[in-house]
Image (tube, rainbow, N blue to C red):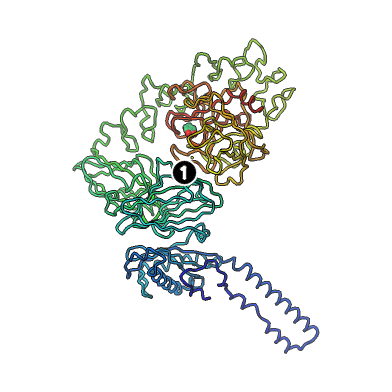
Amino acid sequence: MDPMDRGMRYTPGSSSDMNWELADTFLPASDNKKLKKKRGPGKVGIIVVVVILAAVLALTIGLLVWHFHFRQNLQSQKIYTGSVRIANQAFVDAYENPDSAEFKDLANQVMAQLKSMYSESPQLSKYYIGSEVQAFSEGSVIAYYESEFAVPAGQEAEVDQAVNRLSSKVRRVGEKQGPLVFDHVVSSALDTRLFSKARASMRYSQHAKSSAEEIITSPGFPDEPYAPNTFVQWQLRGDPGHVLKLSFDTFNLEGNCSNDFVRVYDSLVAVDKHLMEEECGYNSPSNPLNFISSRNVMLVTFVTNEEGNFPGFRARMTQISQDSSDLACGGKLGGTSGSFKSPNFPSYYPPNKTCQWDIQVPDGKHIKLRFTTFMVSTGSLNHCSGDYVQIVGVSTLCGKQPENTIVTVNSNKMTVVFKSDSSQVDQGFSAIYEVFEPTDPCPYKFQCDNKRCINPPLRCDGWNDCGDSTDERNCQCDASMIKCRNGFCKPMFWRCDGVNDCGDDTDELNCGCNVGEFQCNDNQCVSEKLRCDGNRDCKDGSDEDGCSRDICKDSTFLCGNGKCLTKPNPMCDGQVDCEDGSDESNCNCGRKANSKPRIVGGQEADVDEFPWQVSLHIKNTAHVCGASIISEQWIVTAAHCVQDEDKIKYSQPGTWEAYLGLHTQKEKQKATKRLIKQIIPHKNYNANTYDNDIALMELDSPVTFSASIRPICLPTATDVFPAGETVTITGWGATREGGSGATVLQKANVRIINSTVCNQLMDGQITSRMTCAGVLTGGVDACQGDSGGPMSVLSNERMFLAGVVSWGDGCARRNKPGIYTTVPKFRAWIKEKTGV
Ligand code: 4AZ
């Protein structure tokens, strides 16, 4: 069949269009006749002819086999999606219904004209298979279509260029060869992930009603998780003169967008040039995703790969009049101060929007503009080629700018232009302007070197409020502050918290210890009870110096047989130092397999770097909590992870599945999965105070240790982790407060915070079974979803489970450390319950 002469629907991937050109060149047998005439049929001649014939036959067969079996595989299916405006047609309601005669008639005309357009291009005509019109919308009439090509390997770029050339020609001069006048075409190659499943897809079409909202959900929502290998499209429409607003009130997909994703288009067809956003992962209902289209159409596509099992989404669609004040932006602004923001802020702004604000303040004053938030899509080429905010004559901003970015003009007029292009939207900006006297730019305030003005009380308060530290320079420290040698002042309660806040250690020198504590020679404080107990609790061992028992005096390690060793840190260092080998027993743990040189403020862990890390999932759904492997069959987590809630029986072993050896949540299939045989929460766990927040889980069958699955070492009951010591936290939890969980395991280093200081910061909620760790200036912390996971400390090149992620006041906030269950306090309990 002539591929250019197909009906309205085409069959992608048909093999009836094979290219026979090469086969024609495989038949040179006439040469043999010439040989015969010249030389006669001598014996040698016959042999030569037979050999040549055999060779030609073999070559022909080989080439035919290659042609039929492989060559067609070298052709790739390419689908271009696009929209074309038909200038000489008026929209009728029947065009919304693909089964109507009107739709079919116009679709056939569009397809015929597309075919004739492609036939003019030598690069396209030979590979063209067919087109399908998917929808029409108003204005005059816009047709949305897909065109399919079978492109030989290596020709894809040429075909891309030819399609682009054709589109820009139609945009320039129009296309009037048929009865239809095309005057605007947008087209782009369709992502293979969309069309590989598209044929087994579901397609819905919904039209917004004036008053009520329309609801769309992922298949199965809310009763069951979405299925694998799903492809669903929703074509959404509103009345002419309206735009569509789509709000996802629940959004919980797999965290890796290359597996499962939702795409929202400002079109009725999946054309990249109108892709507003691709989303995956989890969005807190308190921070709903919210989109606005530029016209009365929108397309939502939902794609999942072979692994599914996340709850999915629900979105509400409404239509808003294009004249609605909700969409208004720009205008004239005056006075001495004011504010403005991008349309739909803090939700996504619509595509194809231009707003201009003309600010004029009283004569003689100048204007300062402060962006409290700024997130504007940069465009593919960067350099603000996509969306931007232009402060005319001063600067053009795009991308993500730091909080409180300031732009000033030395005049009483300022023009600000916001422009979004047809694709990739973002949350936009919020800006505040105010006047300043040219002679006094920061009245009653402190002016930072970066032009920010800060309230005077923030000066010399220990925090870098300017962003460039200029508010903390040249300070006179009052009695409530520590005077650092380098000139900074820091709050007195940061003194001796084990963290070098000054930057030059001034705040950590000459630190005394509390009542009941012993001060080590290196100023560390340990419990008085640990003095002379035979263990080196101070890092320098000074708690065992001069002990009257005289055991291990000036030595470092008490062996199981009572003998002392003078070697520092002999435990698990790979050499048997005690005669009874007790320094090297129980050491098959904590070894970082890969020890090459949404956790907040962290970074991705290396594969197998933390092989004791476990991801606890509610069966067939998402990651919920972390845990740590301590033996082939036991893992440690937080008691608060296994407390029942309204609907979910977290305390029941049957609720859970544990993934061991997991690196990225998108590759669960590569991990070792275990069900849970029993859960033992600590009997004194207090759900109000989070005291004793620890639980044990027994796996249904033992695991075999490998590079990616190994236990972490358990500390001894007397181990203390002194303030200031660096510990590592790991997990797949949220990467910012209220944000979505991480796909790849995250790691971050924080430091142990002095318990007395921590108790003050946490309003007296810290018990002796809790350890605080964090960065008091904020920015690095465990967060929701990290709970139950390890806080580990390195000693003798092995990692020990110092704590279990338990709770905190938000995540990564200033002066709010993370709180961890102190594992040494539960060492005996772990032994009693598990034998480990
Ligand atoms: C949580 O909800 C959680 N910033 C864990 C740790 C922290 C806060 C919350 C510490 O699982």
- Residue 578's place in the image compared with 388, above or below, is above
- Name the quadrant of the C terminus: top right
Quadrant of residue 700 within the rendered picture: top right
- Residue 171's place in the image compared with 51, above or below, is above
Task: Specify the farthest residue to the top.
Answer: 548
Task: Specify the farthest residue to the right.
Answer: 43
Q: Quick check: can you spot residue 781?
A: no
Q: Amino acid at mark 1?
A: Tyr
Badge 1 element = strand
Disc 1 designates what residue? 282
Rendered location of residue 250, percent (x, y): 43, 44
Q: How many marks?
A: 1
Judged left or right of residue 275, residue 795 is right
Task: Specify the farthest residue to the left.
Answer: 363
- Residue 79's place in the image compared with 397, above or below, is below
Judged left or right of residue 143, residue 311 is right
Rendered location of residue 599, percent (x, y): 50, 37
Q: Residues within 10 Å of mark 1 (few under 14, many from 20)?
A: many
Judged left or right of residue 537, residue 271 is left
Rendered location of residue 35, percent (x, y): 72, 86
Residue visible at 38% across and 49% down?
A: 316
Q: Quick one: 275 or 378, which is closer to the camera?
A: 275
Q: Quick check: can you spot residue 152?
A: yes
- Residue 469's place in the image compared with 262, above or below, is above
Say if disc 1 is inside 8 Å of ligand 1.
no
Rendered location of residue 64, percent (x, y): 65, 73
